[in-house]
Amino acid sequence: MKVSFRQLRDEEGSVILVALLVLMILTLIGISATNTSQVEIQIAGNQKFHDIAFYHADSGIYSTPKLISACLDNGAEPIVAGITYLGSSGTFYREVMGYDAHDSDRDIRLTLGGFNVDVDVNRMGQETLPGAGAEFASGAEGVGAGSAGGVALLYGMDSLGQGPSSSLSNVDAVYRKVVGVAGGL
């Protein structure tokens, strides 16, 4: 038996070239998708680190009013586990009471999960609350001791929270402490 092969003149490897071209395009699309996925994973990780730093800074904002209230009620800096006063002894208390002028140095440090949260407190002033007349029996703004009116102290708080990979977040807030009324935030 004799086998003979004939080469067709019109089709000299064009199918192989088309297949290689399609394979190359699919490979480039796959590489691009892999690179995009890696970048998105890095972005998600960075966002997570930023969120942790933000939540730490926010915790400083929510913890500080309790320390301010304790200073006003007790006449001294409260001793609380996990809280470090950054100035010399009594500096935080003196700033809260308004005896010392505000400085830009951070006043207290909280340690959360191995990361520091530094808070600067600034006594911004005071305001007289309405409600001294009988027509304001429940307090004009829903706060205060009934018809007695009162005084509110205003504090600016600047909290700097740290997170993983040297991430930082800064949260500012104003706290209004009504004298004679329990609580903070």
Image: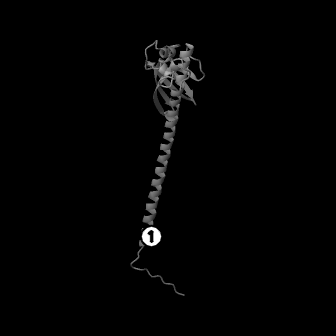
**Scheme of image coloration:** one colour
Asked if one can make out residue 41 in the rendered structure from this viewpoint, the answer is yes
Residue type, label 1: Ile
Outermost left residue? 10
Question: Total label count?
Answer: 1
Asked if one can make out residue 106 in the rendered structure from this viewpoint, the answer is no
Outermost bottom residue? 1
| Residue nearest the observer in this picture, 3 or 88 | 88
Question: x and y percent of residue 56 in the render?
Answer: 53, 31
Question: x and y percent of residue 39 in the render?
Answer: 47, 47
| Residue nearest the observer in this picture, 166 or 94 | 94
Outermost right residue? 81
In the image, what residue occupies the spot 56% across and 18% down?
70
Above or below residue 126? Residue 36 is below
Question: x and y percent of residue 18 in the render?
Answer: 42, 68
Examine the image and state in which quarter residue 102 appears.
Answer: top left
Examine the image and state in which quarter residue 184 appears.
Answer: top right
Question: x and y percent of residue 118 in the render?
Answer: 50, 25
Q: Quadrant of the N terminus?
A: bottom right
SS class, disc 1? helix
In the image, what residue occupies the spot 54% across and 17% down?
180
Residue that mark 1 sits on: 16
| Residue nearest the observer in this picture, 45 or 132 | 132
| Residue nearest the observer in this picture, 164 or 5 | 164
Other residues around mark 1 within 10 Å, as few (<14) / some (14–19) / many (≥20): few
